[in-house]
Image (spheres, coloured by chain):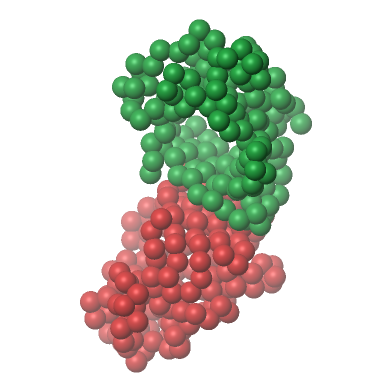
Chain colours: A green, B red
Amino acid sequence: MATEIERKFLLDRTPEELIAAGSFQRRSQQTIEQTYLALDEQQEVRVRRLVDADTGEVEYTHTFKQGNGMSREEIEYSITESIYDQLFRASGAVPLTKTRTTGEWNGFTVELDRYEQLDLTVAEVEFGSLEDAQAFSPPDWFGEDISSKREYSNKKVWKELQNRA
Amino acid sequence: MATEIERKFLLDRTPEELIAAGSFQRRSQQTIEQTYLALDEQQEVRVRRLVDADTGEVEYTHTFKQGNGMSREEIEYSITESIYDQLFRASGAVPLTKTRTTGEWNGFTVELDRYEQLDLTVAEVEFGSLEDAQAFSPPDWFGEDISSKREYSNKKVWKELQNRA
């Protein structure tokens, strides 16, 4: 099982504003529709439909995650459109959508996620080790560090969206 | 992704009869409840609840399989009871149940699966390579080789069960 080590920060500007201001270099962009099939305190199972903004290419994935906070175990694989549709329909859920802009800042790969449904923008940075994650010094345009804040976890955000619907 | 290489045979006697006749040495037994969350020609996603007949220990698994026939790709991991329940409920399906008796025959690990709902018993043998699988010479109490017979695939058997319910 692969270990995912990442830190997450709140942003008070949109990706477009940050690119225009020269704070961030865009490399690619995807629109992501994601649905949680099941979640508890320790594990989550979700499916995603990802559309590349530049090529229009569509990909479907199934992901299992285990653990909480900065370091988590993850298994992800590609599924066919038909498997995605079956799982998505069975869930009966409202999909969460976000625009993910991937790019560079100071040698790091940074993902800016814009959630229109929730008026929320966050930045995620992935690291190779916990030491690298702890040593990371964020730029001044990164807002609050929410890596360990459960109220901004995708699970929490997901539940909020389901309650609204 | 792990590759699963196996051959499957029809049996005309139950595991109990084969053990009593001395054809098969029992090592362990589980009752397995399994539900397909999604399936198409190339892929399948299922969850299982496994109860060890000797210890009473319960385990829950999530499995993704890809491909058809003797050799298939498989990803399997343990899930919590709560994740299992959520996925199972969402599916709205009738679970397929079987009793799996694992044991030895001639140095090979053999699984005898008894499906009471379908009055069907099959034997499965797992191999380390396609060469080993092809070289395998079954005992006379193994019936027809159904490794490539789609009508006995778990998918097919599953659909039959759903149509009956």
Q: Quadrant for residue A69, please give it.
A: top left
Left or right: A37 as drawn, with respect to B77: right
Q: Residue at x 45, y 51 (%)?
A: B60
Looking at the image, residue B145 lies above or below residue A8: below
Q: Quadrant for residue A111, please give it.
A: top right
Looking at the image, residue A67 lies above or below residue B31: above
Taking depth in this image into account, of B103 and A20 the one nearest to the observer is A20
Looking at the image, residue A97 lies above or below residue B85: above
Left or right: B11 as drawn, with respect to B108: right
Which corner quadrant holds the N terminus of chain A?
top left
Residue A90 shows in the view = no
| Residue found at the very far top of the displayed protein | A140
Which corner quadrant holds the C terminus of chain A?
top right
| Residue found at the very far left of the displayed protein | B107
Q: Position of residue A71 (x, y in %)?
A: 40, 29
Q: Position of residue B89 (x, y in %)?
A: 63, 49
Q: Position of residue A66 (x, y in %)?
A: 44, 37
